[in-house]
Image (cartoon, rainbow, N blue to C red):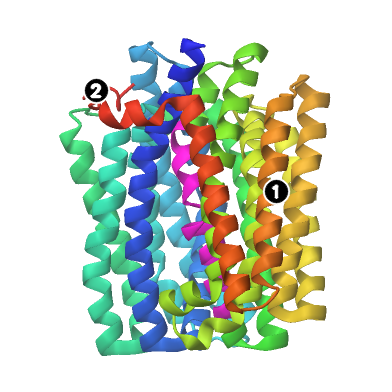
């Protein structure tokens, strides 16, 4: 029992650290989005979103998935410091090589990318310019991969927070003075600032990583690249599906609808998804360390799924009830059309809380072929659902399609991990999940039943009940009150 509580507390500490980081990042992203919405509107956000989608697709194509396979490889060596040093040198060299290749491809392909994305060659220069952002993003990821693999979580947190804060302070004035013309400079400046901050943090961590020759990097890095290429393919597929959905929306509804879609997507995957980002930072290396040990894997996955569910519940019910006000606050009144998308889509986050925990098992086991097959299948389903949802019901249809997708994702992964690894979830988790689903559904029904005083009181009462339930269950597992009182061990963020 004591071991279980310690395990939950360790997870909560890591989640709290990066939850705090993500919260800080969200506040900064909130301010940035608010200013961008004011200065360039939905159409401007649509242009910025398509340029960023282009950048992310090419980054995924050229980085060989080293950001994820590298974390797994570093964590797998555990206390073997010599092997870790060699791996880190290989990774550092491979990241630079892939960064240069990415820039060259982006510059050469810019006219065709502009034509595919915007329908003409007008944005060729813009795309070539943001190739500099690709270079610096890839070099930044090299540093962040090292910090995450070694579990230097405090350094990783500092790099994230300070990079985003300085970028915010620099880019908002650009949007104020240059409006739409600031999109490309802001993308480049943000990437450069993140790189410089990450380098500063890495230098302070005291670790010096030696370069290796490209030939040695190629020979020693083959296992990482084999896994990484498949992981990279999965990322490319995911990004291409998102890219394709944006092009589909642009063709039917125009750039304004693309901007609205991205505003809603940002809420679901950034503001609400902070829990997943925070947990994944520590969860993946920890899961990789236990390797093929089924018993330990079951414990880690089950506890992570419970923790994710309990942390997500209060966020979900608040967004279900107050989406109209939250969206107006985050953006402007023009973005209120995205409310149905957020309300339906956010209910899917509860299903994602469990399927997220299960999905990492496939990567941690190095089961790359299964991971690729599931990625292709799930993304095909997502694209079909999103396209059908938007075609028939507009933005609300996108929200409903996200919910349906995460339900399918949830049940499919339960079957897959049982069949492949004999991994099952506890009855207690199913009870917890079912209770949360009932409470979230009740809040959604109540919120959509009207805005009378009586109905608002009922909705508020349901939110309070859900939050108290979440707090009680969380405290039962982690003794969170004593954890708050206990001073943080200064060395606990490093290993």
Residue depicted at x 29% and y 23% = 492
**Mark 2 nearby-residue class (10 Å; few <14, some 14–19, many ≥20):** few
Q: Is mark 2 on a helix, strand or loop?
A: loop
Callout 1 touching callout 2 (CB < 8 Å) = no
Residue depicted at x 47% and y 19% = 5
Q: What element carries label 1?
A: helix
Q: 359 left or right of 331?
A: right
Prevailing SS of the magenta stretch? helix
Residue at the disc numbered 2: 489
- x then y, percent, for residue 13: 37, 31
Q: Which of marks 1 and 2 is in front?
A: 1
Where, quadrant-wise, is the C terminus in this rendering?
top left
Q: Nearer the viewer, residue 491 or 214?
A: 491
Residue 174, above or below 361: below
Q: Which of 194 and 332 is in front in this view?
A: 332
Magenta includes 386? no
Q: Which of 196 and 326 is in front in this view?
A: 326
Marker count (numbered): 2
Q: Can residue 379 be seen in this view?
A: no
- x then y, percent, for residue 26: 38, 59
Residue at the disc numbered 1: 437
Q: Nearer the viewer, residue 118 or 3?
A: 3
- x then y, percent, for residue 395: 68, 77
**Mark 1 nearby-residue class (10 Å; few <14, some 14–19, many ≥20):** some
Magenta-drawn segment: 258-282
Q: 419 left or right of 398?
A: right
Residue depicted at x 72% and y 52% = 406
Residue depicted at x 26% and y 25% = 486
């Amino acid at each position: 029992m004591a071991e279980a509580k310690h395990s939950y507390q360790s997870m909560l500490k890591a989640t709290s650290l990066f939850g705090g980081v993500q919260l800080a990042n969200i506040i900064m992203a909130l301010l940035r989005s608010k200013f961008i919405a004011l200065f360039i509107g939905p159409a401007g956000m649509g242009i910025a979103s398509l340029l960023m989608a282009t950048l992310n697709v090419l980054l995924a194509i050229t980085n060989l998935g080293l950001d994820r396979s590298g974390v797994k490889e570093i964590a797998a060596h555990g206390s073997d410091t010599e092997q870790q040093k060699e791996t880190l040198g290989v990774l550092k060299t491979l990241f630079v090589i892939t960064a240069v290749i990415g820039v060259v491809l982006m510059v050469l392909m810019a006219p065709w990318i502009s034509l595919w994305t915007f329908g003409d060659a007008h944005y060729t220069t813009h795309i070539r310019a943001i190739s500099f952002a690709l270079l610096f993003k890839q070099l930044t990821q090299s540093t962040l991969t090292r910090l995450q693999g070694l579990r230097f979580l405090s350094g990783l947190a500092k790099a994230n927070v300070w990079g985003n804060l300085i970028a915010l302070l620099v880019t908002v004035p650009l949007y104020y003075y240059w409006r739409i013309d600031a999109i490309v400079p802001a993308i480049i400046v943000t990437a450069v600032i993140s790189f410089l901050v990450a380098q500063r943090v890495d230098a302070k961590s005291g670790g010096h990583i030696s370069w290796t020759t490209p030939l040695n990097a190629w020979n020693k890095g083959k296992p990482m690249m084999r896994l990484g290429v498949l992981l990279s393919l999965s990322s490319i597929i995911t990004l291409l599906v998102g890219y394709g959905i944006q092009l589909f929306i642009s063709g039917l509804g125009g750039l304004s609808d693309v901007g609205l879609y991205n505003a809603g997507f940002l809420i679901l995957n950034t503001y609400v998804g902070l829990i997943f980002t925070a947990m994944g930072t520590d969860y993946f290396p920890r899961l990789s360390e236990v390797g093929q040990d089924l018993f330990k894997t079951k414990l880690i996955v089950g506890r992570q799924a419970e923790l994710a569910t309990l942390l997500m519940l209060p966020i979900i019910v608040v967004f279900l009830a107050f989406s109209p006000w939250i969206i107006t606050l985050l953006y402007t009144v023009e973005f209120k059309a995205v409310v149905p998308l957020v309300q339906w889509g956010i209910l899917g986050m509860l299903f994602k809380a469990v399927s997220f925990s299960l999905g990492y098992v496939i990567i941690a086991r190095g089961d790359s072929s299964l991971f690729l097959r599931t990625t292709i299948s799930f993304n095909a389903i997502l694209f079909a659902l999103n396209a059908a949802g938007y075609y028939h019901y507009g933005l609300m249809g996108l929200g409903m399609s996200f919910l349906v997708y995460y339900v399918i994702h949830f049940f499919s992964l339960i079957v897959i991990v049982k069949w492949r690894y004999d991994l099952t979830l506890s009855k207690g988790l199913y009870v917890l999940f079912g209770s949360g689903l009932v409470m979230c559904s009740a809040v959604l029904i109540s919120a959509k039943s009207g805005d009378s005083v009586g109905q608002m009181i009922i909705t508020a009462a349901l939110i309070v009940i859900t939050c108290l339930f979440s707090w009680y269950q969380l405290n039962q597992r982690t003794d969170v009150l004593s954890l708050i009182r206990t001073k943080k061990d200064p060395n606990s963020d490093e290993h």
